[in-house]
Image (spheres, grey):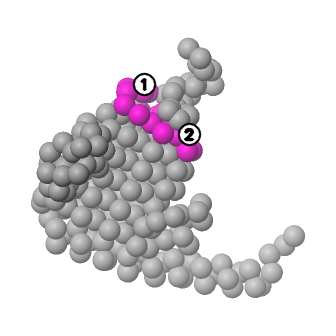
């Protein structure tokens, strides 16, 4: 079926709404980052509701042309929350040039490094810590006392990686360049090589970018 004039009008309205929202959201995000002492590269842009919280000045570093989308109009993949990026304790988050994500949640107590040209799908979560102690007795402590006992290990995501919607990447994970993490995967501690396909809960290498299956190996 052909598009009608109504479709054209609605599409134009949608583009106008997205463009206006992007300008407002980006301005607010840039101010928030600048006020907290976070360097922000040229071409940085956001849409929708985006929250950045730095524990220390300079603990979030964004490269050139980083794009973070928190508005459902700019990505209709089913966003469930705003963009949330935070550092706690000695945490550091680095996002490379031309990388981006939609409704992502990134929280660091150690170090999270995301390379260049990385695509994080809708609702991806990246945590380099457990948020709470695993020992039930220590979870009865005050929040500040708990923090001492929270386990944390760096996360590293290489260049040109694609992470599918609703995937979760946990502490101690290294993902090699050009790899793919399937939607809904839970990626636990371990090194995942370049040019591989990672899927499952817990995630494992199930294939190579050339199509070779390695399931069960």
Which of 143 and 54 lies nearest the eye of the viewer? 143
Say whether residue 207 is visible. Answer: yes
- Locate residue 78: give its quadrant: bottom right
Given this view, does label 1 or label 2 mark the residue nearer the observer? Answer: 2
- Is 179 left or right of 25, judged from the image as shown? right
Report the Cα–Cα distance between label 1 and label 2.
15 Å
Q: Name the disc covering residue 35, or none.
A: none
Residue at (23% x, 75% y) in the render: 31
Q: Which region shows up in magenta?
A: 177-194
What percent of the width, then of the height, locates residue 36?
16, 68
Q: Name the disc covering residue 193, or none.
A: 1
Residue of label 2? 182
Among all residues in the image, which is located at the extreme top?
Answer: 217
What percent of the width, then of the height, locates residue 153?
25, 36
Q: Is 133 covered by the magenta stretch?
A: no
Image height check: is 179 above or below 5?
above
How crowded pointer 1 is (Cα within 10 Å; few <14, some 14-19, many 20+) is rated as some
Residue at (38% x, 56% y) in the render: 105
Image height check: is 42 above or below 154?
below
Residue at (14% x, 51% y) in the render: 145
Q: Secondary structure at mark 1?
A: loop
């Amino acid at each position: 079926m052909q598009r009608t004039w109504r479709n054209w009008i609605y599409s134009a309205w949608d583009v106008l709404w997205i463009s206006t929202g992007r300008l407002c959201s980006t301005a607010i995000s840039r101010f928030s980052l600048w006020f907290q002492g976070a360097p922000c590269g040229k071409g940085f842009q956001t849409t929708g509701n985006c929250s950045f919280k730095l524990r220390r000045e300079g603990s979030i570093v964004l490269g050139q042309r980083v794009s973070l989308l928190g508005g459902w109009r700019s990505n209709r993949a089913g966003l469930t929350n705003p963009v949330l990026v935070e550092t706690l304790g000695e945490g550091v988050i680095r996002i490379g040039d031309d990388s981006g994500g939609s409704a992502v949640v990134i929280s660091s107590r150690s170090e999270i490094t995301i390379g260049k040209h990385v695509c994080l799908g809708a609702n991806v979560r990246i945590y380099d810590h457990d948020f709470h102690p695993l020992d039930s007795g220590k979870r009865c402590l005050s929040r500040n006392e708990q923090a001492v006992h929270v386990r944390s290990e760096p996360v590293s995501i290489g260049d040109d990686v694609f992470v599918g919607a609703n995937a979760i990447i946990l502490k101690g994970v290294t993902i090699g360049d050009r790899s793919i993490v399937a939607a809904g995967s839970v990626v636990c501690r371990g090194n995942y090589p370049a040019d591989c396909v990672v899927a499952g809960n817990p995630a494992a290498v199930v294939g190579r970018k050339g199509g070779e299956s390695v399931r069960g190996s």
